[in-house]
Amino acid sequence: PLARRVDHVVFSCKVGFKKPELEIYRIAADGIGTTPRRCVYVGNGYGSELQGAKKADMEAILVDRGEPVFPDLAWEGETWQGARIKELQEISNLVATAFYVPPP
């Protein structure tokens, strides 16, 4: 259902970088013709992906389902101080109100 709303896809196996390496976030922003500062990264908080997005100068949102889905992987959810949502449907309202960055 989200595929029609995605403008650009980045696969780590194709670009040679993986989260939380800064370059993968920059590649994603370049792919849609913008800067990381104008992007919002949404993730489930595994593998330091949210911290990577913040370091790349993106806003980051944790999709927090309450507890880790993969208990054997490092999860940022317990320490994440940034924005949180429970459902993907909450993204558009949060982005429109909290993260709007006017064009240059």
Image (cartoon, helix red, strand yellow):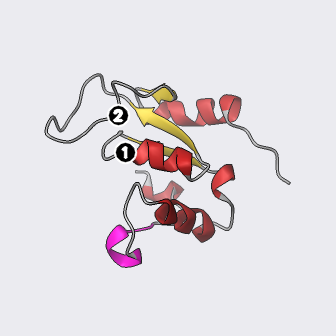
Closer to us: 66 or 53: 53
Residue that lies at the very extreme toward the right in this rendered image: 104
At 35% across and 34% down in the image, what residue appears?
76
Residue 41 pos. (x, y %): 51, 47
**As displayed, is residue 46 above or below residue 68?**
below
Q: Secondary structure at mark 2?
A: loop
Report the residue at 61% width, 30% height from top. Answer: 93
What residue is shown with label 2? 76
Q: Looking at the picture, which amino acid does disc 2 mark?
A: Glu
Q: Earlier in the sequence, mark 2 or mark 1?
A: 1
Are there few (<14), some (14-19), or many (20+) residues within 10 Å of tag 1? some
Q: How far across and down, in percent of the image, does residue 44 sit? A: 35, 39
In this picture, residue 74 sits left or right of residue 101: left
The magenta stretch is 10-15
Task: Tell whether label 1 touches label 2 (CB within 8 Å).
Answer: yes
Q: Residue furthest left?
A: 72
Q: Is residue 12 magenta?
A: yes
Q: Amino acid at mark 1?
A: Ser
User: Which image quarter is the C terminus in?
Assistant: bottom right
User: How crowded is the residue under tag 2: few (<14 C-alpha within 10 Å), some, or many (20+)?
Assistant: some
User: In 3D space, how far apart are the residues under numbered discs 2 and 1 (Cα atoms)?
Assistant: 7 Å
3 lies above or below 66? below
**Vertical relation: 39 (above or below) 15:** above
Q: Quadrant of residue 62?
A: top left
Q: Residue 48 at x, y = what percent?
A: 37, 45
Q: Main secondary structure of the magenta part?
A: helix
**Between residues 4 and 25, which one lies in front from this camera angle?**
25
Residue 53 in the figure: left or right of residue 68: right
Report if residue 80 lies within the magenta region.
no
What residue would you read off at disc 1?
Answer: 48
Residue 79 placement (x, y as % from top left): 38, 26
